[in-house]
Image (cartoon, helix red, strand yellow):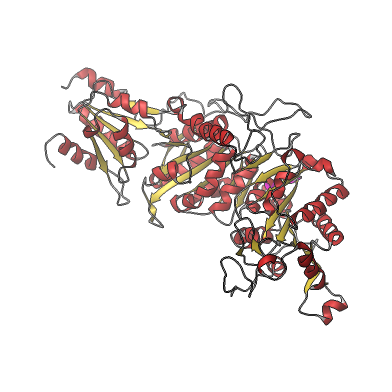
Amino acid sequence: METYLRKRFMPHIWCPGCGHGTVLNGLLRSVEELGLDRNEIVMVSGIGCSARISGYVDFHTLHTLHGRALAFATGVKMSRPELHIIVPMGDGDALAIGGNHFIHAARRNIDLTVLILNNRIYGMTGGQFSPLSGCGVEATTAPYSTVDPAFDAVELARAAGATFVARTTTYHVHELQQFVTRAIRHRGFSVVEILSQCPTHFGRRNGAPTAVEMLSIFKEETAKVGSRVAEENPERITRGVFVEDTVKPEYCTAYAERVQAGRGDRR
Amino acid sequence: MSSHSETRRLARIDIGPAVTKDAPGTVRFVQGNEVCAEAALYAGLGFFAGYPITPSSEIAEILARRLPEQGGSFIQMEDEISSLAAIIGASLTGKKVMTATSGPGFSLMQEALGFAVMAEIPCVIVDVMRGGPSTGLPTQAGQGDINQVRWGTHGDHAIIALTASNHQNLFEVTVRAFNLAETYRSPVVVLFDELLAHMRERLRVPEPGELELVGRLRTSVPQGIDYHPYLAREDGRLPMSDFGGVHRFNVTGLYHDMWGFPSTDPAVVDDLAHHLHDKIELQADQIAAGRRYALEDAEILLISYGTPARSALQVVHEARQNGQRLGLLELQTLWPFPGRMVQEACRDREAVIVVEMNMGQIFHQVQAAVDERRSVFLANRVDGRFITPRDIRRILRIVEGQGV
């Protein structure tokens, strides 16, 4: 698995206890499991802690602008539809500044694999609240705690038209790897929301100052979708695969077919 | 002042498309936006992403149909931000790419324009200018985006911008934009205005091979040997490698080293900042293009570009017939500003009048370039109407001390 890493560019920039390394680990295990050639993977990322994953992996990597990764990725995919495109994004990157690109990429069902590394905070800029922080969270820009409700990333992706939607956490590492593998394999717009801990900027201000405490929360306050635990504890965040639609046409394939058909009509 | 020889010389002045009966190629009667789209296809366009906006939308409409016929692909994006982002992504796979917009859309593109500058991505951006600021005058012409092209995105950088005043020239300029984008690994902006975009006139579509095309310069470094995406050759050019190919590298909008990896090392930052500036600004004379009309003995020089240059040319034509020594320098390169060309053309003139449809964006550049800045005057219109020969003549009378 080390062959997938650019050790030349280590050490990484993540804080001690950050969950993003766990996501990277799961992702690389998925790539290995799928037996993908490094030359057929393009990783496109935006700005933020999560976006820095692209620097550390030995794929074709494009580290772009805050929120715009999916737009860049769309251009890569449309030009080389046979490549696997993986887009790691933070919660603010994906759903605040990048929210419009997110819903439109989902609507098109273009074959991109999106990992939303949701730590509910802007970590790189020092702990401001994000659209996934939710109500009652303390952040540097919410000293009296937030009044902003959160998006549900899974419901948003589903409503916008994504054809593979899953949620897991950095505590559930096997599940994480499994979902990422399925997401990459899926032909269409796939989204895996991964709750990832930021003890430095989220936990420290919200009663869980260490990685262990935050991981315990992921363990104790989530439940598998459809499980008895989930039914008996409706307040828990559900994990699992929420959408898996293999019927809706993938965008690049549909475009190629439509062009072919259109040109035939005109002859 | 007047002489027959001058009149005869004037008769040879090129006043438009150089079409002769014998010239090869198809002659068509088309609007400017169609010329731009056809020229992009001629240059080998492989991918276009755009968002509808007046007065550029026809470019997207034409390419949506024509590009797939040529093996390329088209996508209508959710906005102009994503349109430029998408073509940058496609360029990295080795395609020639373009987007087209107008002022408000170009404002949204400034973020990704800076990325293309920093990451050195060949791409062509067409800005069909309308009246601004803001929503401004969607269906009428202006030339208010000249400085936005130069400084719209943040940070020190250089940029290439070309313009044209007639359809034949627009075709050549658009092809040249693709060539310069590849040569300098830079975004290149093609600027023209609503008038040219929607006006119909004759175009002779050049034969294949008639215009020079510059292809992507790809690395010769074989698989298994380290390829440095940001290590310039001796001639300053940086060979590329396509995404999906055998070399894997990082592309970022951060300051970066020869590997493309982020760096804050002052030496690395300093080198890259100078490289991005110098690779274009030091080539200003090579990139500079202009047309000279009756310049030799001109006492008063008009400087213009885009459609106003058509009116300026008409004024020169008439003035020469009346024995007035008037000349025109039509700029086809706006950025990097062709300062030396302007300075030399302006030397020893009694007056220089810049004709443009804004509040003096090129006028100020000309003032800065000439030896006698007080001899430079501005003839302009900013009401969305075409600046007419009559408008220019009125300013000319004032400059000549004849009153209106």
User: As drawn, which residue projects farthest toward the bottom?
Assistant: A232
Q: Is residue A80 in the magenta section?
A: yes
Placement of B340 over or under B399, stated as above or below: above
Q: What stretch is highlighted in magenta?
A: A77-82
Q: Horizontal and vertical percent for residue A12?
A: 72, 47
Q: Does the magenta stretch include residue B91?
A: no
Q: Is residue B220 above or below residue B355?
A: above
Residue at the (25%, 40%) spot, across then down: B378
Q: Which of A36 and A255 is in front in this view?
A: A36
Residue B44 on image: x %, y %: 60, 35
Examine the image and state in which quarter residue B96 appears. Answer: top right
For the question of whether residue B229 can be seen, the reply is yes
B296 displayed left or right of B213:
left
Q: In this view, does B124 lie to the left or right of B403?
A: right
Q: Nearer the viewer, residue B77 or B113?
A: B113
Residue at 53%, 44% (x, y): give it: B114
User: Can residue A260 be seen?
Assistant: no
- Name the spot of residue A116 as percent of width and height, x first: 71, 59
